Image: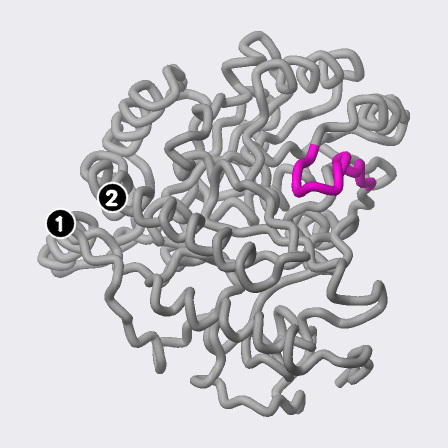
Amino acid sequence: MYNFEKIIDRTKTNAMKLEGYKSYIFDADDSLELPFKDDEFIHMWVADMEFAVAPEILSAINQRLGREILGYTANYDDSLYKALRRWCKDRYNWDIKQEELVTSDGVIPALERLISYVVKPEEKVVFNTPGYGQFAMCAERAEREYLTTDLIYNGDGTYDFDFEDLDKKLAREDVSMFILCNPHNPTGRIWTIDEMEKIAKLVKKHQVFLISDEIHCDIRRKSAPKHIPMAKVMGDYAKMATCMAASKTFNLAGLQQSAIFIRDKEIREEWKSKYMGFLNPLSLEATIAAYNQGGKWLEEMSDYLDENFKFMENFFKENLKDAIVTKSQTTYLGWVDLSKYFEKDEDVELFFAKVGGILLEADKSFVGHANRMIRLNLACPRSYLKKGLERIADALLNKHDEKFTDKR
């Protein structure tokens, strides 16, 4: 029913993926010279999709536009709550509470606010590495320090939780928050119930505030276990918040709306007193439509995505045998260890941009414990994915006969 093979022209739309890569990936301005034009790159970096938004969602947006006025809007009725309640109950057997729901202009701004509300200036935040780079950036923008706890890398693409190290970090008197990426970005790991119960036990033991970032929860491989909301595991723990959004699931990142469930009444009241909660009227309608009508699109997109992951895994197996591909259980992001192809101090991102004409995220984008690892966005037509992978292979096999030392 839905066409995921369609190549969509995103030029002249102010798309971050096409026009914001120099500042985001390379921390540079337009003076950075690269041998490829903007439209010549294969873009496999920032986490939005190259798939058309579901027609059911576009129809809801158009219906709202038909009302002709786009005035100040907020979450006044219970339409959003009902859509979320049905979605969470049907998929995760999770009964959300309406009084805990607040809205935000994205998960990243929500993280910044929660850090600033919970963590005192002399206290610190803890999260896992490799980790989503914005966890560190949110702490920095909130003027708070952070500590990291490395996942255990087994050398074969698999990762495990280091509970002993987490216990040590949370035991510190200057630590008051742990951010759990559930499921995990960038490895695509779904935490088991046993792992989550151990995390919950440590959080309770040290009485830290827990943020469970569950923005990637809706997309998983068919063979993978189902997502478990941390709020279900910690049903009696008040010092926590869960972050969700339709943005990753339905390719609505630019509409910037997320749902934040804050159990802690005091923190929730502080949120409401400091954040007015205005919403983009089109974002609100799109989100409601996504949760009410987007299930079939998500199912078909997930099937297509599963085949993209198989295609990527087979490509590396056949063409780059020393690459170690992590078996992703969720997200649309591939995680690949290229340590056999690079030395520790090579700039992997710049190498692929300058030599291969492909934009991807690696190493420093994931805070730590990610040296010579790359993350690939697979939410794209297979023909586009094939071109990207072929460029990666060509760059490594034919254009990397000596250490890459070109810094800029």
Disc marking residue 367: none
Q: Say which label, 2 or 1, has the lower sequence index.
A: 1
Q: Quadrant of residue 274?
A: top right
The residue shown at (50%, 14%) is 232
- Which residue type carries mark 1? Met
Q: Secondary structure at mark 2?
A: helix
Q: Quadrant of residue 226?
A: top left
Mark 1 sits on what residue?
1
- Is residue 407 shown above or below 275? below
Q: Is residue 123 left or right of residue 314?
A: right
x, y percent for residue 331: 47, 44
Q: Residues within 10 Å of mark 1 (few under 14, many from 20)?
A: few
- The residue segment tinted magenta is 147-159
Q: Nearer the viewer, residue 339 or 278?
A: 339
Q: Which coloring applies here? A: one colour
x, y percent for residue 99: 42, 21
Q: Is residue 72 left or right of residue 169?
A: left
The residue shown at (67%, 34%) is 179
x, y percent for residue 196: 62, 19
Q: Nearer the viewer, residue 265 or 19?
A: 19
Quadrant that contains the C terminus: bottom right
Do the residues bearing badges 2 and 1 touch, measured as CB atoms within 8 Å?
A: yes
Mark 2 sits on what residue?
300
